[in-house]
Amino acid sequence: MTVKSLAEKIGLKPLLLPDGDREVNGVYCGDLLSWVMGRAQCDNAWITIMSNVNVVAVASLSDVSCVILAEGVSLDADAEKAAADKQINVLVSDKSTYEIAVDLGKVL
Amino acid sequence: MAESITFKFDVDGSDFTSAGQASADVKKNLRQLGLSPEIIRRVSIAMYEGEINMVIHAGGGQAFVTVSENDITILLSDKGPGIKDIDKAMQEGYSTATDNVRSLGFGAGMGLPNMKRYTDFMEIKSVVGEGTDITMRVDIK
Ligand SMILES: Nc1ncnc2c1ncn2[C@@H]1O[C@H](COP(=O)(O)OP(=O)(O)OP(=O)(O)O)[C@@H](O)[C@H]1O
Ligand SMILES: [Mg+2]
């Protein structure tokens, strides 16, 4: 499923969607960046509550298909600019990491 | 590609919120050279972990990335405090990161293990009080 249709299906709000046709092949949840870099797979959706600029670097280098920010967090200004530059898909939700993961599990 | 190309980067140690510029540049360069996404991903993650370590633990340093026909070699060199016990530093979960660094999502003690995981060869040379040199190689199959 693409990032765009996934966002529509489970009601995630697109903050940035420069590459909405990208496929999502699975999910990784985590806030410790080196765990994410070690364990997330290319094209995974990554759910996190971290919102600083390093999240953008990790999303880009790990080649995840989108970042999903849980618990209503939003990117800080630096991070949003970096994400726009690097063409990272960023979706936001007020739900918890667990609730988003459950929703994703139903549609993926 | 008969000849090799080397990219050199100065890694600024003063601002770890914007660290990762060298890795981002390497990723771009490797893309332009037409390397596979899988190789690019491994090189850029290994490089980023090393770059962040130089910023967080060593006050910055230099990075050299050499792309040749058969492999990509990354040399990270810093004049930081050095690593006293390399075996311990290589263990998953070992970290001396400060709370400030941890609040940004680093400090899981997974960086060096990731560098090893994503490369075909890795060697750490470190002298306490003098600095650390890390060499990594990713083979292009
Ligand atoms: N270039 C370096 N100079 C001095 N010490 C270092 C250097 N790189 C790593 N270390 C030491 O090795 C430890 C382990 O490094 P590693 O990258 O695995 O974890 P971390 O940086 O603490 O956390 P993470 O990488 O998960 O964010 C560090 O906490 C630090 O004590
Ligand atoms: Mg590290």
Image (cartoon, rainbow, N blue to C red):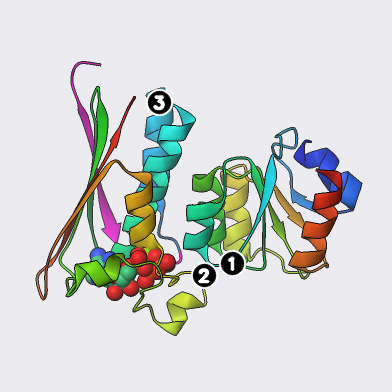
Tell me where residue A22 sits by quadrant: top right
Q: Position of residue B68 (x, y in %)?
A: 23, 26
* Residue B25 visible in the current orientation: no
Kindly identify the residue that appears in the image at 25 percent across and 16 percent down.
B1
CB at mark 2 closer than 8 A to ligand 1? yes
Magenta span? B1-17
Residue at which label 1 appears? A31
Q: How many marks?
A: 3
Residue A40: give x, y in percent of width and height: 57, 51
Q: Chain of mark 3?
A: B
The residue singled out by tag 2 in the image is: B105
B70 shown above or below B74: above
* Label 3 beta carbon less than 8 Å to ligand 2: no
How much space separates mark 1 and mark 3, taking CA atoms? 30 Å
Tag 2 subunit: B
Q: Are marks 1 and 3 on the same chain?
A: no
Residue B55 figure quarter: bottom left
Name the image quarter holding residue B54. Answer: bottom left
Q: Which amino acid type is shown beneath numbered disc 2?
A: Gly
Q: Are marks 3 and 2 in contact (CB under 8 Å)?
A: no
What residue is at 55 percent from the left and 42 percent from the top?
A63
- In this view, the residue in front, B98 or A104, is A104
Kind of residue sitting beneath label 1: Asp
Circle 1 SS class: loop
Q: Distance of mark 3 from mark 2, alpha carbons?
A: 30 Å
Q: Are marks 2 and 1 in contact (CB under 8 Å)?
A: yes
The residue sitting at the top extreme is B2
Badge 3 amino acid = Leu
Q: Which mark is residue B35?
A: 3
Looking at the image, which residue is at 85% across and 45% down? A107
Instruction: Report whether mark 2 lies on the same chain as mark 1.
Output: no
